[in-house]
Amino acid sequence: MLKLHHLSLAVNDVEKALKTFQDMLGLDVTGQGIKEFPEFGVRAGFLSTRDKSSLRLELAEPMPGTKIRYGVATRDFLKKRGEGLFRFAMFTDEFDARVEALKQKGYPMIVESYTSLFPGYTVRIAFYPLKDSRGVWMNLVDANTVPKSSDGLAP
């Protein structure tokens, strides 16, 4: 199964963006509010509907001076296009098969593992390079490596 997990918007100021979307859409801040993700080179805040099932937004601001791929891509996106839809994350419980199928079709997927997203878990993520994806960063997340939770971030 493939499931849209969240949309990510590149923003210049994550605090202001959180307030705007909370006010406009009545969304709730999930998790710990704004959090730094040095392994990705961004500061991010997450919002969702109260039931946490119909809409999740990540608001990503590049960290100053970052040289990390995702942070650099976010910064470059902002410079070139301004704030807006930057990435979507799809969760799948068929991670290896989907990644392999995309590679067989000629899509250059990059698979990485992260231990800092959820303590005690190694989360696997496959990225499709921004330059090849029509201007929107796409990634697949191995749903089997993410803990089940009620914070709106896990599947």
Image: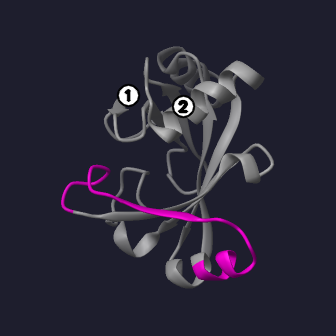
Q: How far across and how far down the image is residue 146, in percent?
A: 36, 65
Vertical side of 50 occupied by 141: above or below: below
The verdict on residue 90 being magenta is: no
Q: In the rendered view of the protein, which quadrant contains the C terminus?
A: bottom left
Q: Residue at x 33, y 60 (%)?
A: 149
Snapshot quadrant of residue 39: top left
Q: Which residues are magenta?
A: 100-120
Give how far across and how far down residue 12 sits, in percent. 58, 17
Determine whether the residue tagged by mark 2 lies in a helix, strand or loop. helix
x and y, in percent, of residue 107 in the image: 71, 68
Q: In whole angstroms, how far apart are the C-alphas of marks 2 and 1?
A: 19 Å
Q: Residue drawn 34% across and 34% down?
A: 38
Q: Which residue is mark 2?
A: 72
Task: From the viewer's side, name the closer residue of 18 and 11.
Answer: 11
**Snapshot quadrant of residue 122:** bottom left
Classify 10 Å Cα crowding around label 1: few (below 14), some (14-19), many (20 and above).
some
In this rendering, the label closer to the viewer, 2 or 1: 2
Pointer 1: what residue? 34
Q: Look at label 2 and name its amino acid.
A: Val
**Circles 2, 1 touching at the beta carbon (< 8 Å):** no
**Disc 1 on helix, strand or loop?**
loop
* Numbered marks: total: 2
Q: Label 2: how many residues lie within 10 Å, few (<14), some (14-19) or many (20+)? A: some
Which of 45/79 is in front? 79
**Sequence-wise, which precedes: disc 2 or disc 1?**
1
